[in-house]
Amino acid sequence: MKRFLSTLNNIWKIEELRKRILLTIGLLAVYRFGAFIVLPGVDASKIQTQDAAEGAKDLLDLINTFTGGAFNSASVFALGIMPYITASIIIQLLGFAVPYFQRLQKDGETGRKKLTQITRALTLAITFLQGSAYLSMIRNDGLVMDTISMPIFTICNLIILSAGTIFAMWLGERITDRGIGNGVSLLITVGIIASLPQSFAAEIGAQSGTFLVLILELAALFGIVMVTVLIVQGIRRIPVQYAKQVSGRGSNIAGMKMQNERDFIPLKVNAAGVMPIIFAQAILFLPATIGQYFISNGSELGGLYTQLSNPFSAISSVLAFLLVVGFTYIYTALMVNPKDYADYLKNMNAFIPGVKPGQPTADLIDTITSRITLPGSVFLGLIAILPAFAVAAGVNQGFAIFFGGTSLLILVAVVLDTLAQIESYLLLKHYDGLMKSGRIQGKQSRMQNIGAGM
């Protein structure tokens, strides 16, 4: 405890780190404040009555978890950052198939700025689409005041929802640039954490007569978190040797002799991080959006629509698993470029023992990446559907979301990355890090970001 307090004191001493943390906290507080501002024309008392009568039942409640309750509360941040996530997915997928976007990805800073502008424009278009469906949903739920004109209500609140999403996107960019990084992920994380106390209290009430069951649930949750941390931090090290020339007695004809310096290539088991699950959930959100326009509960497609919108159903779980596995391979192929590793090794006069430089090295790295991506993708798929198993075991649906899926992986990944960011500042200023041992402070490779799209 004493060392922990000393570390906190060291964090406060670093002026740049202190400013970044305070700025991040302030921007996150602004985001959470906006989650409580209800859209004009919406009856707040009806929202409270509906929330008390209903529980988490479909995919829309998962979106509500990401927005920290803003979705069900019909707030100005009801859509949160999700339209921006969807737009980013589309742009990245276009980078695989459309030559124009491929050229932009290779144009350096100029191409990145152009892609950012396109992503923002697409975010606005998606926000109009999802916002229209959302306003249609709250009208059908009877949450709109009777005295409000529907055309005026729709037009005004569509503009407000779009402005809320753009503002949330701006907050995420500011946190990334001037805060402690991962702005978009931190916005989602804060929303998830905001709903945790209420969900845990509901679970305590549901298991009040069976205290042992609650203990077993918490033990299972702890075990799942620990395994998730291991997978998220797991790497496959490929040994590398650098041929270094130094002068001295016994040198070769050129007056130099060769001395080997050892290093390694760190290939992550989960190179795609949390993005495949976010991508999969965004894709699964499309039926819920389209269904607001074209599908009624009494239609022939109503049953299938209900199953697809329920994250705990068998159909939704199978689709989520397949989408996560597929997106893991796609995103890993995007982020990990074996040729970049091979070129870097060749330029640095380094090699993998027993492997020829150039294409054979790239082929080896590609093979190893494919092999370790398989268990990583299967694990992510299982994480995505663990809440469905938790519900089947009797866990409250609101609390079951934290047993896996996007909520758990985002929390683990963002917390670990934030700790790593703070750790780097502490070590840079020659302070003790947050951990005496472990991967965060452990030996780092000079090729940590080579070929990883960083």
Image (spheres, helix red, strand yellow):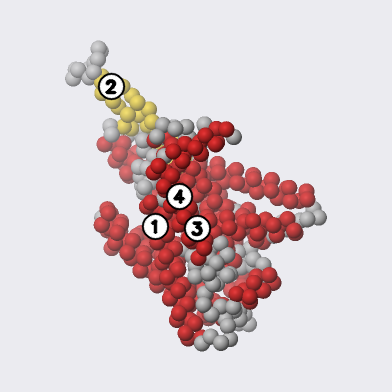
Q: Which of the two marks, 1 or 3, is nearer to us in this view? A: 3
How dense is the environment of label 2, judged by Cα within 10 Å: few (below 14), some, or many (20 and up)? few
Q: Which of the two marks, 3 or 2, is nearer to us in this view? A: 3
Q: Which of the two marks, 2 or 4, is nearer to us in this view? A: 4
Q: Is residue 28 left or right of residue 105?
A: right
224 or 199, nearer to the observer = 199
Tag 4: amino acid: Leu
Tag 1: amino acid: Glu
Earlier residue among tags 1 and 3: 3
The residue under the point 44% across, 55% down is 183
Earlier residue among tags 3 and 4: 4
- Residue 22, labelled with which disc? 4
Q: Are marks 3 and 4 in contact (CB under 8 Å)?
A: no
Q: Which of the two marks, 1 or 4, is nearer to us in this view? A: 4
Mark 3 sits on what residue?
Answer: 29
Q: Is residue 334 above or below residue 152?
A: above
- Secondary structure type for disc 2: strand
Mark 2 sits on what residue?
Answer: 258
Mark 1 sits on what residue?
Answer: 173
How dense is the environment of label 4, judged by Cα within 10 Å: few (below 14), some, or many (20 and up)? few
Residue 280, given in percent of the width and then of the height, sits at: 50, 61
Query: If the image is split into quadrants, where does the N terminus sit?
Result: top right
